[in-house]
Image (spheres, rainbow, N blue to C red):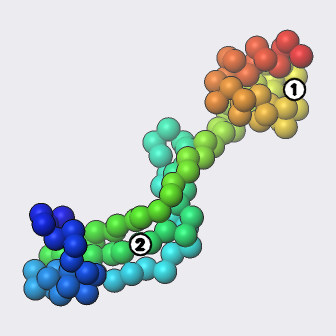
Amino acid sequence: MFPGMGKMNPKQMQGLMKQFGIKSEEINATKVVFELADGGKLVIENPNVTVMNAQGQKIYSVVGEAKEEKTLNEEDLKMVSEQTGASKEDAIKALEESNGGIAEAIMKLKKE
């Protein structure tokens, strides 16, 4: 954020931010979920979350290991089931194996 301040301890950084009118506090979060435009989710378990208030704007900083979760669309499941006569469970498995590819899932189930 500020050049040359990478070695500053957190208390010094907080003091400097306070001088600039930036208030920060830790949030005790157990999980942070970002819902992505493609329908997937980015999940961060046990994150370090800080909220900073600068000039009336809240800025959230999230640090942690993220994993991406793909969510299956109900319409896709229905289409795969209808086209193949497969159960919902089999349609889910085929869609997961094909990374959400409807055509690939249908072809896979029709071969079985």
Mark 2 lies on residue = 49
Q: Amino acid at mark 2?
A: Val
50 on left or right of 35:
left
Mark 1 lies on residue = 86
Checking the image for residue 60, the label placed there is none
Q: Quadrant of residue 12?
A: bottom left
Q: Amino acid at mark 1?
A: Ala
Query: Residue visible at 49% across and 68% down?
Result: 47
Query: Residue visible at 25% across and 87% down?
Result: 11
Q: Is residue 17 visible?
A: yes
Q: Quadrant of residue 87?
A: top right
Query: Residue visible at 55% across and 47% down?
Result: 68
Q: Is residue 53 visible?
A: no
* Viewer-side residue, 85 vs 95: 95
Q: Position of residue 17 (x, y in %)?
A: 17, 80
Q: Quadrant of residue 110?
A: top right
The quadrant in which the C terminus is found is top right
User: How many angstroms separate mark 1 from mark 2 (CA)?
Assistant: 43 Å
The quadrant in which the N terminus is found is bottom left
Query: Residue visible at 47% across and 46% down?
Result: 36
Q: Position of residue 22 (x, y in %)?
A: 18, 80
Q: Is residue 75 above or below residue 32?
A: above
Which type of secondary structure does the marked residue at label 1 adopt?
Answer: loop
Q: Position of residue 73 (x, y in %)?
A: 65, 38
Q: Is residue 38 above or below residue 56?
A: above
Q: Position of residue 111 (x, y in %)?
A: 85, 12
Q: Earlier in the sequence, mark 1 or mark 2?
A: 2
Rate crowding at label 2 as few (under 14), some (14 to 19) or many (20 or more) other CA atoms within 10 Å. Answer: some
